[in-house]
Amino acid sequence: MTTTDRQQSPPSPPPRPPAGPPPSPLRVRGDLDPGLSRWLWLVKWVLAIPHWMVLAFLWLALGLVTVVAFVAILVTARYPRVLFDFAVGVLRWSWRVAFYTNAAFGTDRYPPFSLRPDPTYPADLEIAYPERLSRGLVLVKWWLLALPQYVVVALLISSPWWVWQDQGYQWSVGAGGLVGLLALVGIVVHAVRGSYPSALFDLVVGLDRWVLRVAAYAALLTDRYPPFALDAGPREPGEVAGPDPVAPSAVDRRGWTAGPVVTLVVGAVLCLAAVPPLVGGVTGLATDVTARDRAGFLTTPPTVVTAGGYAVRSPALLLDQAPDAAFWPAAALGEVRVRVAPLDPARPVFVGVAPRDAVDRYLAGVASGTVTGRGGNRPAVVEHPGGPPAPAPAEAGIWVAQSTGAGTQTVTWRPAPGDWSLVVLEPDGRAGIAVTADAGATVPGLRTLATLLLVIAGLLVVLGATAVTAAVATAHRPARALPDRP
């Protein structure tokens, strides 16, 4: 072949990279501290308490941010960048604290109180910003598609237990899981031998990486489904260990400082605080409009009460008593109505309301029962031994309201402050109580209270939304460059 032929030959194409899955948009780093203390891990649980307290509020804010992002993705197919940075920052902060404590025990350097990337800290996390997200996936990926991953993550970070409770074993779930157990084994071995087993550390970080990938997917930060693969090791697959380069986000996105973060958390807390009054207000208005009978009473479902004695009393009705007692304000109930019907229509029944101390004296030594309040529409009754009552119920002279006879008996009463009992007796002197009963009240201030709760909820939502908007606007504002010093 001549020189001219070699010059005219086309250049050989560059070698193609090996085929394989694209790199994960989430990058998790966790480098083992070479100077790890043997015994500091014993107190890291206490040292990390300030971080856990802050993270509790940050995750509350992250929940609100995720809801907002869900709507934004559904409408625009984009995760708002400033909210994306905040969400990634919360995951980053959580990973650093977990790496410091029971998810790895990988470093003795105290985690920074910061959402920003820090290439100098042994643990860090980055997620590539997606320019576009699927509108369809956002509807199902965080619950339906992620269900298999949730099962795996539950095994990794939680521990099932059988605990003895209420005279029986109950299924319970506690913190720890496989990750916590392996990390504990590793740090105990380090305390004994002076070295953390490298293979065990790589496995722990790989499991942590799995959990963080699922968290990012469930938080709508990526459409890439977490792989069912364990990428063990302190760095991502194919990443060479060494100095961690400063990510562009550490230079370009500097808005989530302490001020915007605190403002966002306050806004999230205010929005969350609006949920109880909102639910209460809506429920109150719906009840006031739809649940009243023709007489204006809000009535409980019928309850079947049976006992073997001569009388059955209700639990104590405490009205306007001491603040440490369970009570219903008397004025709030309005007019109260109790209806009692014997299961045997041929037997009469007596219903009366009296002060509790007077009832106690009257039923002393009487075979009677006390309703415990448990058991749904057929509550349990605690039986007390004794004989028949004397004098007859209608002659006791203790009742502020009473009714007796065959068929359904109705007692209407306007409660006054005090400690009261409702009593059902058999006036014919025969033992055995078997009745159905319901109670109702007019609750005249229900609509006013429901409206007030809705107003409070509206104010909290407005204040919370204002705080969140201000936080996002402040974080989105570009940082001003500092002038050069002479």
Image: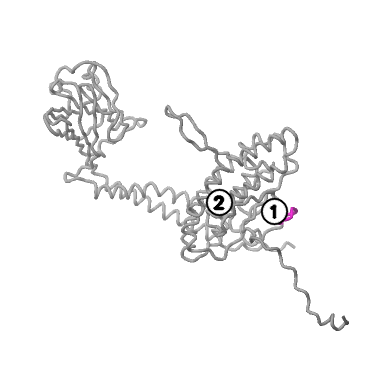
Residue ID at (39%, 53%):
459
Q: Which of 41 and 74 lies nearest the eye of the viewer?
A: 74
Residue 60 x, y percent position in the rendering:
50, 49
Q: Identity of the amino acid at label 1?
A: Pro
Circle 1 residue: 119
Please tell me whether residue 317 is drawn above or below residue 469 in the rendered image. Answer: above
Circle 2 residue: 215
Direction bottom: furthest residue = 4
SS majority, magenta: loop
Mark positioned earlier in the residue sequence (2 or 1): 1
Q: Does the magenta portion include 241?
A: yes
Query: What quarter of the picture does the C terminus occupy?
Result: bottom right
Residue 163 x, y percent position in the rendering:
49, 31
Q: Identity of the amino acid at label 2?
A: Ala
Residue ID at (20%, 27%):
424
Residue 189 x, y percent position in the rendering:
71, 35
In the rendered structure, the answer to whether residue 204 lies left or right of residue 363 reads right
Question: Quadrant location of residue 354?
Answer: top left
Please tell me whether residue 486 is drawn above or below residue 202 in the rendered image. Answer: below
Residue 55 x, y percent position in the rendering:
56, 46
Question: Quadrant location of residue 296?
Answer: top left
Query: What quarter of the picture does the N terminus occupy?
Result: bottom right
Crowdedness near tag 1: few (<14), some (14–19) or many (≥20) residues, C-alpha within 10 Å: some
Q: Secondary structure at mark 2?
A: helix
In the image, the segment drawn in magenta is 237-244
In the rendered structure, the answer to whether residue 107 lies left or right of residue 274 reads right
